[in-house]
Amino acid sequence: MANSIEPSSSLSFTSSSHLSNGSISHNQSSFSAPEKGVNLEVFSLNKLSSSLEQLLIDSTCEYSDAEIIVEGIPVCVHRCILAARSKFFYELFKREKGSVDKEGKPKYPMSELLPYGKVGYEAFLIFLSYTYSGKLKPFPMEVSTCVDNICVHDACRPAINFAVEMMYASSIFELPELVSLFQRRLLNFVGKAVAEDIIPILLAAFHCQLSQLLAQCVDRIVRSDLDTISIQKELPTEVAEEIRMLRLKSFPDDENTAVEVDPLREKRIKRIHKALDSDDVELVRLLLSESEITLDEANALHYAAAYCDPKVLSEVLSLGLADVNLRSSRGYTVLHIGAMRKEPSVIVSLLTKGACASDLTLDGRSAVSICRRLTRPKDYQAKTEQGKETNKDRICIDVLEGEMRRNPMAGDAFITSHTLSDDLHMKLLYLENRGTLFCVYDDFGLYSLEIFEVTTVVQ
């Protein structure tokens, strides 16, 4: 028998997130009888929706027959409901039985269900709640906003990323009404977000084959100042080529594109970048000696801060041949790029070599504000468990805030860490391979940095 999935004519929204606290309990009396004048069909559908939702949020209603493992967390599901609502799950459960646990429940790792993209735990719970109840819950603030208190969260990266995760879930698991909804939401982001934040939206549109959204993203990037290297490194080859051709057609008389490119110079710069990709700093040194191209002309520090192993960046800095505060054609310093990457060792290496934390982008953002707008409250507030990786998000912000505190000329009055005074006195331990990055702070900020060879976690 065929299983057809018909999109609903409208979406229901609810004003509170039951999934966030699990505090809902059965209240059968509220559905004892429809009020006078209430349509019986609407009343019955609302009751059905509420009853199905109880299967997800009420621990006493444990009738699940499968588990989907998301970010290491098992999420109990009912295969009959998912199969009825989603053609993807209908085919999955018909085709695969999953690995069975002691209780006899088949398990399905989320990573094995997704051909592309990412769907996190919170996004899957929102998707699952809609699948069961037909009602779309509000997004949890801890994963759909950033930790910048002056941000309105209408186009910061966490807001975009969560909507992208919902799009991947809606598209891959085949709920067309949600695809339409989140395509409209992402289209709204395209006009507001900074150019580099368009990239995850474009990738979602490309993989989910959303032609309208993809066209809007391509058009926005064509008109933006996003550099060619970022486009080539982070976008599919065919999309990058389309953007290149559209830029040539759209701005044939632009003075920036009209200047003839020296192919030999470009070739030499690419060789330097390829040497950095290969972690071969000695080759970089050789290439510099064989040509007139400098590290600054190749934007080598920007490139290494964005794409290379942190140790490679440290080695390039040690050459002493590049300006650590050089600005790219987009007005970004190397520290701005390091803040976008959110890698503590990159940020600390740059600061110890004299990177200026007070430098602002052309639109007025400092490195610490960039970092804040990329960080979710969930990640910032996460506690580090013994023997596990240190909270990188928190370290990046605290390191930059410490430097801003040390340098009162920074001009960023919005230092928002809730425990700043305590954090500036702590020792930041960051494990990287077999070496530990050891940063010591006092009231004036960062003052020492050493590498200790260790094999265990230092308490």
Image (spheres, grey):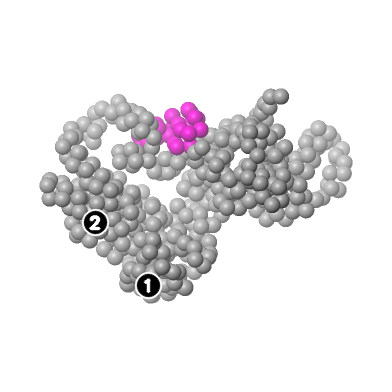
Question: What residue is at 77 percent from the left and 50 percent from the top?
Answer: 61
Position of the N terminus, as image quadrant, is top right
Q: CA distance from mark 1 to mark 2?
A: 24 Å
Relative depth, front residue between 93 and 85: 93
Under mark 1, the amino acid is: Val
Badge 2 marks a residue whose secondary structure is: helix
- The reply to whether the magenta stretch includes residue 203 is yes
Which stretch is magenta?
202-225
Question: What residue is at 80 percent from the left and 50 percent from the top?
Answer: 26
Dominant secondary structure (helix, strand or loop) of the stretch shown in magenta: helix
Badge 1 marks a residue whose secondary structure is: strand
- The reply to whether the magenta stretch includes residue 106 is no
Q: Which mark is residue 176?
A: none
Question: What residue is at 38 percent from the left and 64 percent from the top?
Answer: 434
Return the residue at label 1: 440
Is residue 177 found left or right of 386 in the rendered image?
right
Above or below for 5 versus 440: above
Is residue 43 found left or right of 259 in the rendered image?
right
Is residue 175 found left or right of 320 in the rendered image?
right
